Image (cartoon, rainbow, N blue to C red):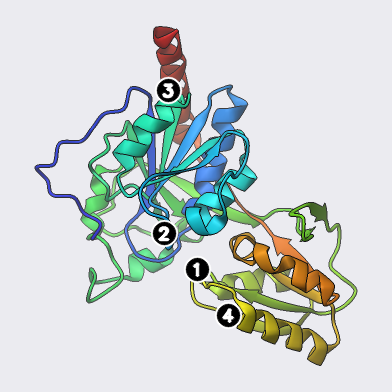
Amino acid sequence: MWIVRPHSKPISPPVPTLSVGNLRIGGTGKTPVVQALARYCLAQGIRPAILLRGYRRRSRGMVLVSAGEGPCVPWQDAGDEAWLHAWKLPQALVLVDRRRERAALTAVAHGAELLLLDDGFQYRRLGRDADLVVIDPATLRARCCIPFGTLRQPLRAARRATLLLLWEELAGNPLPAELAGLPTVLLRFRSGMPYRLDSTGATHPLQQPPDRPVVAFAGIARPERFRSTLLQHGWHLAAWYGLPDHYRYGRATLWWLLQSCRRYRTPWLATTEKDAVRLLPLLPRLERAGCTLAVFPLEAEFCGNSAPLWELLQRLVEQARRARKDLA
């Protein structure tokens, strides 16, 4: 499903390309990592394009989610992750296509100077200059590949990675023999400033937790991590609902969320940014019912000895600048 046959010849785009991936199914934090890398590119004056497959979108073929001015299609046509990239990084290009090599050439035609391949480690039809692989504790605990386990590839496949991004929880622990000796950078996740999201899509920062308990919910790979985040930040929970990853919110879900608010006598709902994207069409109804949606963003930080990552990024940025001069 993910692995292209070895004899497939990759297409090399005319601009630097960096892939971010993992070895198992489920969330390992690729989305905030890609956003952190895109912000670095933008700060260096390089225009990035983020390329994704567009998981669980209703559209087909290639879709230009953002031409550098924020989302230009509904989230259902882009997928929640691609739409979130376009929303959080309006200056970046965002494209979805099962054929990432086609999206790459289109992105370059639209002015992209560096390509970020989100979830691209197993996609070999598109050439790249470097591969970053995110390793979390669940990856090291996994024993079998699909369909008998959660690994997309055996651990030894990570030996073709340029850098491993290790979750901070793994610091100081010995790595399996398959990963021993590979260059690593520690990865830390933290919550950004929570905000209130209104029906127009405008955000309003929340400097402190609400004075009432919240009805919290999350439809992500590991929703219990969001629950822990709320508690760590001093938010009091009236109710908690963990939902399946990429959960699609509809009228029935809206009804029981509103019922929960009435039952616990609170106007506050709290969720993740990915869930907020999927809730956008329902926000006017929530507001009319007197409910307020609080959203927690997730951000990635590179800690410990992160010099190898910054050196790699700087090389790619310099390569992008040289390509810009050649095309001028």
Task: Give the labeled residue for mark 1.
Answer: 246
Q: Residue at x 43, y 61 (%)?
A: 136
> Callout 2: few (<14), some (14-19), or many (20+) C-alpha neighbours within 10 Å?
some
Residue 71 as seen in the image, left or right of residue 140: right
Task: Give the labeled residue for mark 3.
Answer: 315
Pointer 4 and pointer 1: residues touching (CB < 8 Å)?
Answer: no
Q: Secondary structure at mark 2?
A: loop
Under mark 4, the amino acid is: Gly
Separation of disc 1 and disc 2 at Cα? 9 Å
Separation of disc 4 and disc 1 at Cα? 12 Å
Residue 106 pos. (x, y %): 39, 32
Separation of disc 4 and disc 3 at Cα? 42 Å
Instruction: Select label 4 or label 1 by which is in front.
Output: 1
The disc, 4 or 3, on the residue closer to the chain's N-terminal end is 4
Residue 235 shows up from this direction:
no
- The quadrant of the image that shows the C terminus is top left
Instruction: Select label 4 or label 3 by which is in front.
Output: 4
Residue 217 as seen in the image, left or right of residue 106: right
Instruction: Select label 4 or label 2 by which is in front.
Output: 2
Instruction: Select label 3 or label 1 by which is in front.
Output: 1
The disc, 3 or 1, on the residue closer to the chain's N-terminal end is 1
Q: Secondary structure at mark 3?
A: helix
Pointer 1 and pointer 2: residues touching (CB < 8 Å)?
Answer: yes
Under mark 3, the amino acid is: Arg
Residue 37 as seen in the image, left or right of residue 143: right
Residue 22 pos. (x, y %): 36, 55
> On residue 242, which mark appears?
4
